[in-house]
Image (cartoon, rainbow, N blue to C red):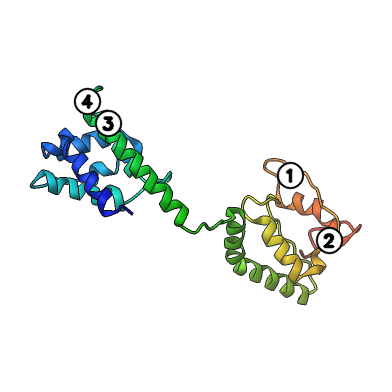
Amino acid sequence: MLSIELYELCQNVLLKCDYFANNNAQEIRNLCRPINELRHLSFQIKDSDSSIYLVQSVLAIVVEGENDAEGWIFPKFLAALKLSIPDGDARRVEFDNLLSKVQECKNIYEVEQPTTHIDKHQLFNSILEIDFVDQEYNVIQAIRYQENLRRKAAFLVNGYDNRYGQTILIERLFRKLPQLRNARKIRIKLDAGCEIYRFWEQIAPDFFWLRTYTENDSV
């Protein structure tokens, strides 16, 4: 991402920082550790044989390495180094100039990259579409098997909403088995600890119409 000129400027400015000038990798790790966005650098930055090697190894990590969720970490790393320099020190001006050039480089790079809009909701639904192939097949097979035995088949889908894909599964079943649609909602009240028999007692009239459900009925 960095031009040769900008990379050389980075080297020169960092070499003037006490941490790099003294080849003190441990202090750089200590600097990064309390900063959430830079904490992982405290595990990646290693000791080097010389100041220039330390600069080059750190640049390789912060320029081309792992970034956080909010973007490129290099400007954040430079800002942290700048804060370690006392106010009034001329090196702060050099860091400001470097930060400005790095930010400009970042903006140009982002403009040049093609933008791809991903609808997260659509992506989630697509994943659910794939996941529900097996469920859809099993439900349809179970219904048809019960029909061959002249029985009614019912399935309870808990929570008709989009949180876990219930809507998608049901709509897929409606498309494959349109006879499942009854054009009306079945509303029943389930109390805590409700026995299964009581549940079927409430819901059976919607399957057997007005005939009273008994334990001898096959559902």
Picture quarter containing residue 148?
A: bottom right
Q: Nearer the viewer, residue 110 or 19?
A: 110
Residue 88 pos. (x, y %): 24, 22
- Residue type at the position of mark 3: Val
Q: Is residue 72 left or right of residue 125?
A: left
Label 3 SS: helix
In contact (CB < 8 Å): disc 4 and disc 1: no
Query: Which disc, if any, is residue 190?
Result: 1
Gap between marks 4 and 1 measured at Cα? 72 Å
In contact (CB < 8 Å): disc 4 and disc 3: no
Q: Is residue 33 visible?
A: no
- Residue type at the position of mark 2: Phe
Gap between marks 4 and 3 measured at Cα? 8 Å
The answer to whether residue 38 is above or below residue 1 is above
Q: Residue at x 30, y 37 (%)?
A: 97
List the residue tagged with mark 3: 93
Q: Which residue lies most toward the right here? A: 210
Gap between marks 3 and 1 measured at Cα? 70 Å
Label 4 SS: loop
Query: Which disc, if any, is residue 33?
Result: none
Gap between marks 3 and 2 measured at Cα? 79 Å
List the residue tagged with mark 2: 207
